[in-house]
Amino acid sequence: FTSRKHHWPVVSSLLKNLNEEFSVFDNATEIETILNGIGSAYLQQAYKRKSIAQVADIWTNHAYAGDYNPLHDHNAATQGGLSGFIWLKTPDSLKVEHKDGYMNGASGVSDGTTQLIWGLRQRQDIDSLYCPTERYYIPEEGVMLVFPNWMKHQVMPFYGEGERRSLAMNWAI
């Protein structure tokens, strides 16, 4: 794991720090309320469940050229849980469109992407008419992804100047 991860296990402590960094919020409670609303809305829209999601962990990830985050999933304080992140900053090298499908001489534009995996199928299984069970997301500032905490995911390294920064969180249900 080469990503520089800053983890604050106590949510209120991080929310206070985030409030100082993101002065658009009046207080830490506002950030927590927004994130709890996002988690609860996800449960209602994706699963048609009237459940309450409560932020359990929140941290920032800071990655630079060559840094990556290997395949993993997340634990939750409860039997069910959600995980998610929002990209806060992306390096200029990831903001370039690659119309030919190549980046740094490799097929498939994957530099700096986040891969979500929800099944055991392989890419060649698509030719056998199996549904895809993975997706790569190119980082875009302000975009947020929310998913069940059991979902495997990884972050590919990027090459170039700058920082890729995300705010990640886990919700208990």
Image: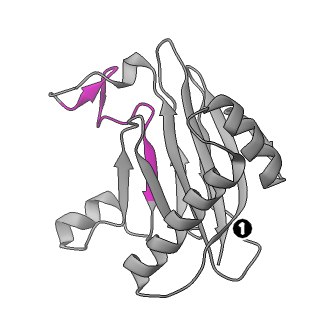
Q: Which residues are magenta?
A: 101-116
Q: Position of residue 126 (x, y in %)?
A: 22, 65
Question: Which residue occupies the extreme bottom position in the image?
Answer: 49
- Asked whether, in this view, residue 147 is left or right of residue 102, the answer is right
Rendered-image quadrant of the N terminus: top right
The image shows residue 147, relative to residue 45, as above or below, that is above
Residue 5 is situated, as x and y percent measured from the top left of the image, at 72, 37
Write down the residue under mark 1. Answer: 75
Comparing 151 with 57, the one in front is 57
> On the rendered structure, is 160 left or right of 58?
left
Quarter of the picture holding the C terminus: bottom right
Q: Is residue 65 magenta?
A: no
Seen as rendered, the residue at the extreme top is: 161
Tag 1: residue type?
Asn
Q: Nearer the viewer, residue 156 or 97?
A: 97
The percent coordinates of residue 159 (x first, y second) are 47, 19
Residue depicted at x 61% and y 32%? 23
Residue pictured at 23% horizontal, 25% vertical: 97
Q: Is residue 11 above or below residue 113?
A: below
Q: Position of residue 90 (x, y in %)?
A: 46, 26
Residue 139 visible in image:
yes
Mark 1 nearby-residue class (10 Å; few <14, some 14–19, many ≥20): some
**Is residue 102 a member of the stretch shown in magenta?**
yes
Which residue occupies 52% across, 15% down?
A: 162
